[in-house]
Amino acid sequence: MTKKVLLALLTTLVLAGAAITHTVRAMAERPDRQQADASVLVDRSGGVRLDEPGRLVFRNTAPGPDHGKVASVSLADPAGPRRISGLSCDRFYLSAGTGLCLATAPGPLPSAVAVFVDKELREVKRVELAGIPNRAKLSPDGKMGAWTTFVTGDSYSQSGTFSTRTGIMDRDQDQLYSNIEGIPLLVAGERHHAEDVNYWGVTFTRDNKRFYATVATGGRTHLVVADYDAWEAKTVRENAECPSLSPDGTRLAFKKRVSTDNARPWREHVLDLATMTETPLAETRSVDDQAVWLDPRTLAYSLPNERGGSDVWAVPADGSGAPRLLVASGSSPASD
Amino acid sequence: MNARSRWGRRVVAPMAALALLAQPLVASGTEALLAENLLSYNKPTTTSSVEDETTVGGLAVDGDIATRWASAEGVDPQWIAVDLGGPAVVSRVKLAWEAAYATDYQVQVSADGKAWQDAKKVTGGDGGTDEITGLAVSARYVRVLGTKRGSVYGYSLYELEVYGSRTGGGDIEPPTAPAGLRSPSSTSDSIALAWDPARDNVGVTGYEILRNGNVVGTATTPSYTDTGLVSATSFTYAVRARDAAGNLSAQSAAIQASTQQGGNPGGTVIVVAGDIASPDLPETHRNTAKLVEGIKPQYVLTVGDNQYHNGTIAEYRAHYDKTWGKFKAITKPSPGNHEWYDKLNGYKQYFGAAATPQGKPYYSYDIGDFHFVALDTEPIAKGTSSKSEQLAWLKQDLAANKKACVIGYGHHPRFNSGKYGDDKTMTEVWNEFVKARADVVFSGHDHHYERLKPLNSSGKVDEANGVRSAIVGIGGDNLYTQIKKREGVEQAFAKHGVMKLVLSGKTYSWEIVGVGGTLLDKAGPYTCR
């Protein structure tokens, strides 16, 4: 297979553009080489553990030597002092006391590494990947890991295109599917033969038998549900990206493209899987993230801040209320 | 996606281009008639940019078609310049483009490397090899200035060759061409060469040895032993002489020489490769076809994506047929996903009865003690309705087999360290081969070479119950270089070439031979299970 005709989707361009802009800016300014932000309180009395109840784990984005490190705050007082670990990631996720750290790796071509860590953030499994880190998620039991990177260089035929690479690691079976784009796909019930398929943003069901994800093909994005054992995916609806299943598996948070304004195209929604009705959330800013469920009623996500970093916000999952700031200078929120 | 023939094209410089040149650049008639020599070989280069340290300018003038210069991506213009070492009359420039070719470019000349004048302006180029002849311009520096890219990437040249004759600046007289080239002896992986010394007005300082047109070595005395070669294969050799001033002689008359039989004398020789003929990369499948010619196999097995982009009959005729088509009568093909873009119509029409010898695009046959199974994996990978029928056939075919050795081949690999990774859709196929205690499975799809230890149904190394495999998607299309080695990988690399498989009794072995004839990997001999 070759000459992949890649998605020319703005969706992905925006995502990839953001990732690359971020990388370029990071290299130019190196937030980890800047002076530490004195307004960010740090608790040096304890380390970060993934099995400690009542903690919100996230990626620290405050400038200074701890930029990019996995950190945690008390969920009861998220604005309080943060504990900071020695583990650096571009994207982090936590489930059942297991962590998944997606980090940039050195190499002549953009490379990444997906590292599974235990409750004390010790490495237990490492997978080398191609591309620039983008999304990382674990199944509720922590046994299935999934990630998305951005890769370039797949095509000589189209200009300005990027491609996603999404992989799944089955820790129980010790099976790695480093690129799921070969999964047989039904689009609106029809067998799909196009080569321009790109997946991103995987979320597993509680029994690990199914997963949801976004697929782009033929200039459209679809929400798909896939049967892991049978290895087959089918589209569910259009325009629902970066899905995130609720703890009870009945609802799906996702970002929906609501505007052609590429500066702010997204609105976070929740889809009721029984009725397939969608509810826009009270967050009206453009959320470009795979949101996480802090509890059955609350979603958390990151948004860019005015300081060139990002903050973690939360919003009710039923469309009510208003967004509230959880952690300043953070991204990749996760809690068990 | 149109089928285009893009090689063998010659771009002749119109006189108008020469008239544009100010300065007395036009050489006199007598000078233009001087012997034409390669002036650019291993001369200093300068470039506007390089993609990385593996694609520097010198690689475009090193006589090695496996290496190349590549500019930074996505920015116009870009250029590469070569310093010929002194004043010269340039008569011809040859450009071998990689897939990142220029549609618009200028060939420019300069006396000082600063002020450039166009010697030829090309618009609407389509890559492949451009040969710009009929030039007669004085220059010390020659530059190729790319102004419009044919891809989203940069500009990349396998080779930039400038021909002509030196006109001043010290010793400009090249040595005489070496004569009497011969091959006194050879082994299974080396060929000894000798020739009569060349003469020079000052003194010959060394010789360059070309194998299949590619510089493979240098010698200071008139003999050379070419090593690391594939067995029982013939190669074309030529040598040229150089002097201290860097003047190169014309090439000697070419000779053919062969390596000896390897460990399996009298074995059946089979070539295996896939992912072959891309309209965008005419050079590479022409080069791999040359390897097949040298190997002189009894059979050629293809592992799919034989013809890009859609495997139509027009594409097959315009590309594959011009190179690998020579072996059509001995080819036992299998189709890939690209053949399926044309619903196998082009594939079936091109290969005729060989495409469906038993009525389907999957089939089996025996050679000696070996049972071969050719699969059509795309319907299995896509989960189409014909999948179960083929799997049932495979099961039945393997059950009915009486031969001691079993080799399977098809497009999609089950286990893979390349771009596509392990393929869950191939689980049932692989498990059938495991159950049947098959010996080895060859596939393509990913564009690299990979040799894997015997793997069981779970993809774990299992010498007792696993099946050996290799990916040979190196027949000519773009290579995939970001290999992340999975469990069981014994060897992996991204280089164009073919597999030479040798069957002997109940044993088999293979060599991977790279473009130019270099031995890249050696596997076996293995005894059938």
Image: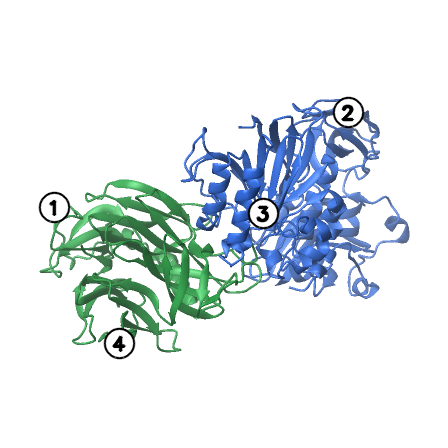
Chain colours: A green, B blue
Same chain assignment for discs 1 and 3: no
Write the residue at 86% across / 43% down: B35
Same subunit, labels 1 and 4: the answer reads yes
Which amino acid type corresponds to the residue marked 2 in the rendered image? Pro
> What x and y, as percent, mark residue A289?
30, 64
Mark closer to the chain start, 2 or 3: 2
- Residue linked to disc 1: A46
Element type at marker 2? loop
Q: Is residue A207 visible?
A: yes
Q: CA distance from mark 4 to mark 2?
A: 81 Å
Q: Is residue A25 left or right of residue A141?
A: right
In the rendered view, tell whether residue B121 sits above or below residue B502.
below
| Mark in the foreground, 4 or 2 | 4
Front in this rendered view, residue B322 or B185: B322
CA separation in Å, label 1 and label 3: 59 Å
Q: Chain of mark 4?
A: A
> Which amino acid type corresponds to the residue marked 3 in the rendered image?
Leu
The residue shown at (78%, 54%) is B8
Marks 1 and 3: CB-CB under 8 Å? no
Which residue was labeled with disc 2?
B222
Q: Is there one chain holding both mark 2 and mark 3?
A: yes
Residue B375 marker: 3
